[in-house]
Image (cartoon, grey):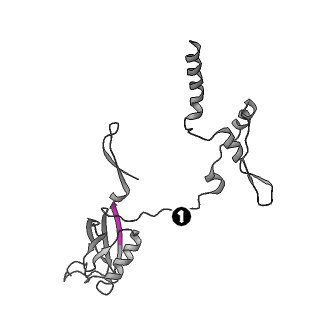
């Protein structure tokens, strides 16, 4: 009678592996998925199953590593960062001559034919996604590229300033950062 509980325990232990959920595909599922039916009635090989043995390992050892980038090249356009809420933005405005909105007072004993510029101090992009530019008002900048914002400001200043040229700089890209905290790392804000 003592062998019955041991036999029952052994049977349960061996069947436990088939009753528990698996983390990956079974060998049968891998072999079944290697070929799929083709519309012409044949089988189309999706992948090939290769036995791993010392000869296969030696053949692979001499082969250079494959890289999708090396095979196809990187033809993606570069990702241009967009201005986001909370980013610090500085705006510089140049005018074609003196006597404009952003040039200093005219000095009687000096003559200046060069352009005049003004730096609008850095400011955070507000919750409404806008910044303030003198004589242009609130400019919606969130979700736009700096060069697109430059064109918007130039259009707003046209007719008010003397041939305005604008440069928009994101000085602190807060919206493109992540805060890392935890026991192993001291808390820090890092760029993405």
Q: Image point 59% across, 13% down: which residue?
A: 3
Q: Is residue 12 above or below residue 72?
A: above
The magenta-colored residue range is 167-172
Mark 1 crowdedness (10 Å alpha carbons): few <14, some 14-19, many ≥20:
few
**Screen quadrant of the N terminus:** top right
Q: How many marks?
A: 1
Q: Image point 59% across, 40% down: which residue?
A: 24
Q: Residue furthest bottom?
A: 159
Q: Is residue 157 in the magenta section?
A: no
Residue 149's x, y, as percent?
37, 73
Horizontal side, residue 99 vs residue 154: left or right: left
Majority SS type along the magenta span: strand
Residue 150's x, y, as percent?
37, 74
Q: In this view, does 58 lie above or below 90?
A: above
Horizontal side, residue 81 vs residue 48: left or right: left
| Residue 111 placement: quadrant | bottom left
Toward the viewer: 27 or 98? Answer: 27
| Residue 41 placement: quadrant | bottom right
Toward the viewer: 54 or 149? Answer: 54
Toward the viewer: 115 or 84? Answer: 84
Secondary structure under the numbered disc 1 in the rendered image: loop
Residue 104's x, y, as percent?
22, 77
| Residue 31 placement: quadrant | top right
Q: Image point 59% across, 18% down: which residue?
A: 7
Q: Is residue 32 above or below residue 90?
A: above
Toward the viewer: 36 or 135? Answer: 36
Q: Residue furthest front?
A: 1
Q: Which residue lies furthest to the top in this view?
A: 2
Q: Image point 36% across, 54% down: which residue?
A: 177
Q: Is residue 184 above or below residue 13?
A: below
Q: Name the residue under label 1.
A: 77
Residue 146's x, y, as percent?
39, 69
């Amino acid at each position: 009678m003592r062998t019955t509980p041991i036999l029952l325990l052994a049977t349960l232990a061996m069947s436990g592996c088939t009753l528990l959920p698996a983390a990956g595909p079974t060998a049968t599922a891998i072999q079944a998925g290697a070929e799929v039916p083709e519309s012409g009635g044949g089988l189309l090989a999706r992948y090939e199953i290769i036995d791993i043995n010392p000869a296969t390992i030696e053949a692979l050892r001499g082969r250079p590593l494959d890289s999708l980038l090396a095979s196809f090249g990187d033809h993606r356009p570069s990702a241009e960062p967009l201005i986001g809420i909370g980013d610090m933005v500085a705006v510089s405005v140049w005018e074609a001559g003196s006597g404009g909105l952003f040039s200093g007072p005219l000095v009687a004993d000096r003559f200046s034919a060069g352009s005049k510029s003004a730096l609008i101090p850095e400011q955070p992009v507000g919750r409404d996604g806008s910044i303030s530019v003198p004589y242009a008002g609130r400019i919606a900048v969130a979700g736009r590229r700096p060069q697109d914002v430059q064109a918007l400001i130039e259009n707003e200043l046209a007719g008010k300033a003397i041939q305005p040229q604008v440069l928009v700089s994101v000085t602190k890209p807060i919206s493109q950062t992540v805060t890392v905290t935890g026991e192993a790392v001291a808390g820090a804000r890092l760029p993405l």
